[in-house]
Image (spheres, rainbow, N blue to C red):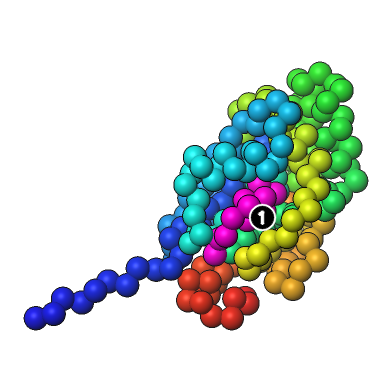
Amino acid sequence: MVEKQQIQPKTQRIILFPGLAADERMYAGLGLLPVPLVTPRLLVPESGETMAAYARRHVEIYAIGPEDIVGGTSFGSMVAAEICRQQSARALVLLSGALSSAALVKQSRKLNRLAAYVPFFMTRRLLMSSFFLHAVFGDADSDQIELGRAMIRQTPKPLLLEGGRLAAGYQPTTTIQCPLFALHGGHDRVIRAPQLDNVELIDDAGHGMVVSHAGQVTEFLCRLCQQVAGDTSLKL
């Protein structure tokens, strides 16, 4: 009797990096995906480190390879984009994300610049304020707002400051070779929706849609994983 060989999926993992003032808890509400989901924490940038070097450290530490789908939310999406500029990947996925600092709205750029000149406790206090959190999460419930506040409170100071510097000054010149997909909130007040063919909108979602609209984000990721892994047209 001939033993049947198990066909290994072409896509090994989907790797999603969190936002700057967040961690893996922001993805806790996502449902089951067709491929293993990895949600690593962002490394703390070194003083003066470039985005290229910062992204390369993530590749090396998390062993990111050409069969992985790489993505992220907000600043995490910029890190993912730089990874995909440096090496091949199955796909890049932006969730409330951007390909460069140019997509940041005016208020976001001001906040990043302000953080370099005011006492850090004031910056963290602003980020943890109900006004800011409701602006980010939109129509989120109280538990989701408290999750956002807890993640900001526990984010290391160097990550917020140096990460903010990288987010504000990321102006890449190289192109991305892999397929690119994006899901964005229609009420996002932090990052403008990317001008791409493969972009979908959740009309009533804000920048924190991964938390507030986890079910719709899960559906999007399931379709993406199935189609990329199946080598179809790569269009959602």
Check disc 1 and give the amino acid type: Arg
- Residue sitting at 81 percent across and 18 percent down? 119
- Residue sitting at 83 percent across and 26 percent down? 116
| Residue 73 in sight | no
| Residue 118, position as x, y percentages in the image | 85, 21
Q: Quadrant of residue 197?
A: bottom right
**Camera-side residue: 57 or 163?**
57
| Residue 15, position as x, y percentages in the image | 53, 53
Name the residue that disc number 1 marks: 85
| Circle 1 crowding by C-alpha within 10 Å: few under 14, some 14–19, many from 20 | many
**Camera-side residue: 80 or 125?**
80
- Residue sitting at 24 percent across and 74 percent down? 5
**Camera-side residue: 133 or 65?**
65
The vertical placement of 47 against 165, above or below, is above
What secondary structure predominates along the stretch shown in magenta?
A: helix
Q: Is residue 199 magenta?
A: no
Please identify the quadrant where the N terminus is shown: bottom left
In the rendered structure, the answer to whether residue 17 lies left or right of residue 184 reads left
Q: Which residues are magenta?
A: 78-90
